[in-house]
Amino acid sequence: MDFFDELCQLAAASPRQRWVGADHPAWKAFLADAPCPAPDSTSGGAETLDELQCQAKNCKLCKLCELRQNVVFGEGDPHAKLMFIGEGPGAEEDASGRPFVGRAGQLLDKMISAMQFSRKEVYIANVVKCRPPNNRAPMPEEAEACAGYLKKQIELISPQVIVLLGASAAKYLLDRHEGITRLRGNFLDYRGIPVMPTYHPAFLLRQESAKREAWSDLQKVMAKFGKVYSKK
Ligand code: URA
């Protein structure tokens, strides 16, 4: 029986509920069978974000694939001028398949709108696309296995500025091993793209007093786009 047969059966069995949600097993099975090339290397030949996402969905390059509910590929404008890179999905992101949707995500949304952007205008991704257990930081081998996806995302989106959220993002994208307190606030470079490391929103939730510094970092990013904060 194929996916559409199953949908018809479901519709017949419960005519008042014709719509099958994204988390329904029939839909998941359909997606799992989708004819995407399984990547043998994450640098992959993908020419679009959709193709790359399709590859990531089947990825088994590290052990994180065994525990995931969803691959959290990233989301936003494929031509975004501004890109945010976090560490890796947490429980809510794993359950929904979307980056930064939990409490830290709500704070990130506020940071983005304070910068006079909307979430839809930017692109949000993570170093690793599958949830590390117990919200631990990604291990080097996990970040390495996933690096091709992130680098290809950056290449395809080609943002004007990247904001790195937290030390893991700086460590694995730029090979910078200093703490985020030392790194934050100054532009670094990734293949010609200015990169601003700043505090991770999850840290800002625990350490309210660091928000002022984060805001100063974000204002430097705003300035790159000719945006200036003004109290009306
Ligand atoms: N923290 C991250 O680094 N990324 C997410 O997507 C959510 C929380």
Image (cartoon, rainbow, N blue to C red):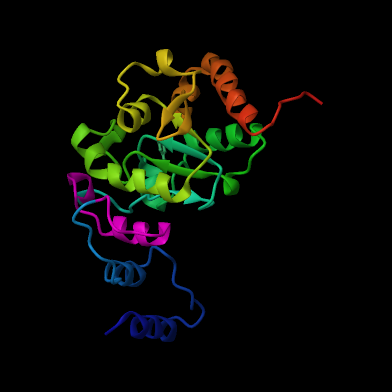
Residue at 47% from the left image edge and 49% from the top image edge:
157
Coordinates of residue 97 in the picture (x, y in percent): 40, 52
Residue at 37% from the left image edge and 67% from the top image edge:
24
Bounds of the magenta segment = 42-65
Coordinates of residue 183 in the picture (x, y in percent): 42, 17
Observer-nearest of 162 and 102: 162
Coordinates of residue 122 in the picture (x, y in percent): 55, 44
Q: Farthest residue in the front direction? A: 192
In the rendered structure, the answer to whether residue 61 lies left or right of residue 55 reads: left
**Which of the 4 quarters of the picture holds residue 136?**
top left
Q: Is residue 57 magenta?
A: yes
Count of numbered marks: 0
Q: Is residue 201 magenta?
A: no
Coordinates of residue 132 in the picture (x, y in percent): 27, 39
Image quarter where ligand 1 lies: top left
In the rendered structure, the answer to whether residue 172 lies left or right of residue 183 reads: left
- Picture quarter with the N terminus: bottom left
Residue at 22% from the left image edge and 62% from the top image edge:
38
Observer-nearest of 19 and 89: 89
Residue at 64% from the left image edge and 27% from the top image edge:
223
- Picture quarter with the C terminus: top right
Q: Is residue 177 above or below residue 65?
A: above
In the rendered structure, the answer to whether residue 135 lies left or right of residue 103 reads: left
Q: Is residue 69 above or below residue 134?
A: below
